Amino acid sequence: MKSQSGSSPMGTFQRNLTWWVLFCMGLGVLLGHVFPALPSWLDHFTYAGVSLPMAVLIWVMIYPMMLKVDFQSLKRVGKNPKGLFVTWAVNWLVKPFTMYGIASFFFFVVFRRWIDPEHATQYLAGAVLLGAAPCTAMVFVWSTLTGGNPAYTVVQVASNDLIILVAFVPIVHFLLGVSQVPVPTGTLVISVILFVVIPLAGGILTRKAVVGRKGENYFSEVLVHRFDAVTTVGLLLTLVMIFMCQGEVILQHPLHIVLIALPLILQTFLIFFLAFYLCRALHLPYDIAAPAGMIGASNFFELAVAVAVALFGTTSSAALATTVGVLTEVPVMLTLVGWANRHRWA
């Protein structure tokens, strides 16, 4: 995957993603402040609680990512399944619940002087959405930077995408129910269909059609990379739109950005080290352990943002929390890439 290497233009963008995110945050806040009627006008374009402009932008981001997932690779699972067991256990039996526990402790106990209960509940909801959505496409970047096994990484990503289809809704519904956040199951299901099932089906059908006509090399080396810039534009425009709608909340509570980031960062380190060193304890090779740690530590923030917007609205504190997840992800993950590269084993 040439465009995902560290020396490529796309790799350079990924390394500088934090600065792009900061720029889009600032631009969005500025637009929301200068044109306060714009977010209200965009709210008119909704269907079943889902923002149609946001849906379009999310599809622009997710569809190219789904193109990169080859589900035929699942046939190779039996050759070394222990790495997959670690990935599945950490991502689905540990991560959502540690995220809930850590976020609850910080938002309702440690930060109770600065965050009122209403905002704390919404921030917790956003954190839960992040915790229940392990990373998909961005893992290819982190795996490349750590020298991970590319074929095994594809299997990890593909299996996680399948699990998301059945596990995301019940886990989120359970944890948000514990948080006493009213969540209509129908909206959650519609969100997963819109932002996972539809782009996933589109990616599978596109792969099948193009590979059948022009071959695997053309698909993986040419077609997929034509969408890299499209994904970037979709991500940046999504951030501008979210922070435009969140502008007044941010201006009223600038400290909250930092307070939201702290438990998210702590959770990221915890999950990475758990998966990474559990693989080592099981005597798995480094090139399997590194992607296993990365896929658990990072988040499918596109899905989390989309569901937060669909459930709570673009101006909600929950949507803000998921967006802070985008801001913290890149610098933290690059730090973990450096750690992994310094602690390789044979």
Image (cartoon, rainbow, N blue to C red):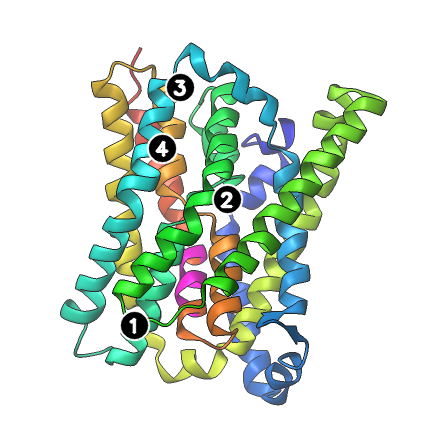
The image quadrant where one finds the C terminus is: top left
Left or right side of 118 for 287 = right
Q: Which numbered disc covers residue 165? A: 2
For marks 2 and 4, give the CA distance: 14 Å
**Looking at the image, is mark 2 or mark 4 earlier in the sequence?**
4
Spatial distance from mark 3 to mark 4, Cα to Cα? 17 Å
Q: Which segment did they paint magenta?
A: 320-326
Which amino acid type is shown beneath numbered disc 4? Trp
Considering only order in the chain, which callout, 3 or 2, is on the residue closer to the N terminus?
2
* Image mark for residue 121: 1
Cβ–Cβ under 8 Å for marks 2 and 3: no
Q: Residues within 10 Å of mark 3 (few under 14, many from 20)?
A: many
Q: In which quarter of the image is the N terminus?
A: top right
Marks 3/1: CA distance? Answer: 39 Å
Nearest the viewer among 344 and 266 is 266
Q: Residue 147: x percent and y percent?
A: 45, 22
Question: Which callout, 1 or 4, points at the residue further toward the start of the chain?
Answer: 4
Q: Which of 198 and 245 is in front in this view?
A: 198
Q: Is residue 76 left or right of residue 132?
A: right
Q: Which mark is residue 88?
A: 4
Mark 3, secondary structure of its residue: helix
Earlier sequence position, callout 2 versus callout 1: 1
The local secondary structure at tag 1 comes to helix
Residue 297 vs 150, above or below: the answer is below
Magenta stretch mostly in which secondary structure? helix
The label number, if any, that marks residue 200 in the structure image = none
Q: How dense is the environment of label 4, judged by Cα within 10 Å: few (below 14), some, or many (20 and up)? A: many
- The CA distance from mark 2 to mark 1 is 26 Å
What's the residue at 50%, 44% (across, down)? 165
Q: What element carries label 4?
A: helix
